[in-house]
Amino acid sequence: MADSAETLVEDARTCYHCGEPVPEHAPWSLEIGECRYRLCCPGCEAVAHAIVDGGLASYYRFRTALPERPRQRHDIHAEQWSLFDDPGLQSRFVQGDDSSAHTTLAVDGITCAACAWLIEHRLNALEGVIGSAVDLTHHRLRLEWEPHRIALSRLLAELAAIGYPSRPFEPDEAQQRLQRESHRQMRRLIVAALGMMQALMFSLPFYLAGDAGLDADFDRLFHWLALALTTPVVLYAAQPFFQQAWRDLRARSLGMDVPVSLAIGSAYLASTWAVVSGQGEVYFDSVSMFTFFLLFGRHLEARARRRGGAAGNAMAELLPVSATRLDDDGESRLLPASELRAGDRVLVKPGHVVPADGVIESGASSLDESTLTGETQPVARCVGDAVTGGSQNIESPLTLRITHAGRDTRVAGILDLTDRAFASRPRIALKSARLAHHFVLQVLLIAAVVALAWWFIAPDRAFWVTLSVLVVTCPCALALATPTALTAAHGRLHRRGALLTRADALEALDGIDRVIFDKTGTLTTGEMRLIDTRTLEDDDPRYLCAIAAALESHSEHPIARAFHPYRQPDVVADDVTRQAGAGLEGRIAGTRWRLGRPDFAATPAPAPPDDGHWLLLAENDRPRAWFALENRLRDDADTTLATLRLAGIEVELLSGDAEPRVRTLAEQLGIDDWQAAMSPEDKLARLRHHQARGERVAMVGDGVNDVPILAGADVAFAMNGATDLARTRADVILLTPRLQRVADAIGIARATQRVIRQNLGWALFYNLLALPLAACGLVPPWLAAIGMSLSSLVVVGNALRLARPGSFRHLITPVSS
């Protein structure tokens, strides 16, 4: 290994990228870490740098074959994208199969909502693209396509062609790019602010002099100074507006930066011509002021997005870079966390972060899971408990056995679900985007009509009145109204412990009329406990508990966990089948055993010993034992139901349990509408009945038997302990065991829709009021710049109320209010 980054690997006679011989004194090289490797040609240099700059330097360590060398210099650009079609490279950032693949890309050059619209519009029009969606908060692109119809390199080349070069998303590198973009944005804002202040200083004497005017020499001096100060503002600070406008025009679309660029460019050129020729009006102060206020508004918008998406950034950076792995002999070794695999043993010291999902093998401690669940209080974990990667160990050292690492961890799954939520746009977001797009065209047409009218009324004022129309009606507020509110709502929901997996869920939650709850694992904790065993013959209770435990070991139902302590290694069940809502059947030592409802386990079905939750164990239809289970009610179940009722939402309980248990729970919680002994098909039929009556129904569940009704509900909630299959059908996943988050999600959804309607109403009201005034010549360009910026700030500020914890204190309000 080299001692420094300046050290060259001189003894390497073959190209590090393609393996071809390297010519003597070849200047091409690649730096990775502290080593610099030799390359054979500029083509290999371009391709290798694309791989490393894309955050995929580990490709060189794990590759199994050498790629082909770029053939000619004109092939370099094509090769730069075609390398991403390599299966070995794609395995590190692409998920899916030949029929459908998806990935997340980091995109450069995004400045506003118009960029997102252009990217999605261009990609979704390509044959073979299933869907694409831009996350404006983190400048990420969720892309799904059919590999057999279109190559990833084609998609990357298409993005680069419209001005948005992209690369595989890596959290650390993406965060650094966002910080660099933020610094560039701040520099432009400072240049615009300084230029505006100085231009105003040299323009102020003209306003104060009145009709008398200034001396001719001072007149020309101040104009030239204002020109010199405004030029950097236009050429540097306003550069993003011109770049985006050019992208829009090349893509044959009209974004909000088209009228902005027309206003800035025409005002600057007209004022410059007036200074050079000595004839006409000069509005350098308006140009610099318009640029500053527009940049300032976008800067606040970007800050709002970063703050609203702070939870997503924190989640992306949650897993540590390194981990301490324990060898078979107990020796510890520090290695990158990305090299951990399922089955590895790791040591997590106090103050360190758990590097992957696992189970505690030794030790007991408290873990901070606030970033994952939103719960501020640490939770106690001991031997046998599962821990999630990203949790912080607080008190004592822990030894873990890794169960899921890398892309299989819960954190990675949450990130993937978050990206999936942005893979579609809510209907209201699509409508507002189309409205803003059409509004730009209308503004340009109106500006043309105003210019023509004023040409006949007062030719000397035609240009400046038209400029005011372009500036004052810039559709920035209209374009920001919806995405800013959605970003703030997503961030607040995540901090409250609710993760949206579908963008339309927010809009659907706003109109929910009824919430259906499952019982076990939803209204109750799902932590079943065996409290009594009654044998029906002269049998050993411990042996019958082991029989039940062997059957339940094949189930993911919460009941299975109650029998886990009674498992015996020599009692194993084979050919286990499960009948939803009834029980389990299997063979143990050649004998058929059933465990579950009495009418399922034995024929005829005996009556339970007394009230409570009883399971019957039967051998070949012969009852052998009764098991009494107890399930604790969630602490916040009653307050959650009361909050929903206050909002005018109907509450219903559907359970597969026996009627006595369901009735007792319903009476305890005051639920009038309940059904017991419901199969999954019965639950789905009940759901369809409500929907046929015009109700919009949300379902809250956690088990495999809830999957059909979760899939059929208008909005599906999965509890934090839900099965994987239930999670895949959920629109909202609760990251915390608190049931109150269901009511919080509905309340935040209602507040979000109110804010979006307020923002759209304000944006339309402002434009309808300002446009006639500007068209009549009553609004000078400098005042138009201020009005446009204030309109955008009002929209952003109103949306940010959703992100503040103290705002909308009573999120759920009665529907009549």
Image (cartoon, helix red, strand yellow):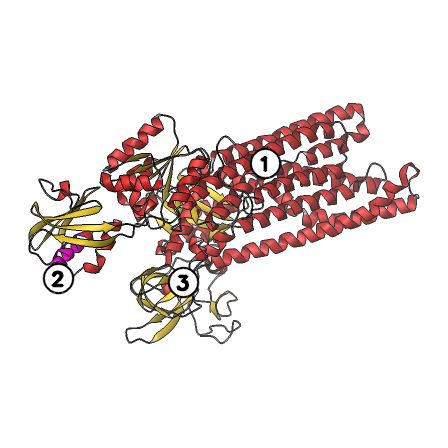
Q: Secondary structure at mark 3?
A: strand
306 vs 667, left or right, is: right
Amino acid of disc 3 = Leu
| Residue nearer the viewer, 673 or 769 | 673
Note whether residue 151 is visible: no
Q: How many angstroms separate mark 1 from mark 2 (CA)?
A: 66 Å
- Where does residue 61 sit, x and y in percent of width and height? 38, 65
* Up-down relation of residue 340 to residue 151 (above or below): below
Query: Pointer 2: what residue?
Result: 570
Q: Residues within 10 Å of mark 2 (few under 14, many from 20)?
A: few
Which comes before the other along the chain, label 1 or label 2?
2
- Where does residue 471 sit, x and y in percent of width and height? 69, 36
35 vs 762, left or right, is: left
Q: Which mark is residue 759?
A: 1
Amino acid of disc 2 = Asp
The region drawn magenta spans: 539-551
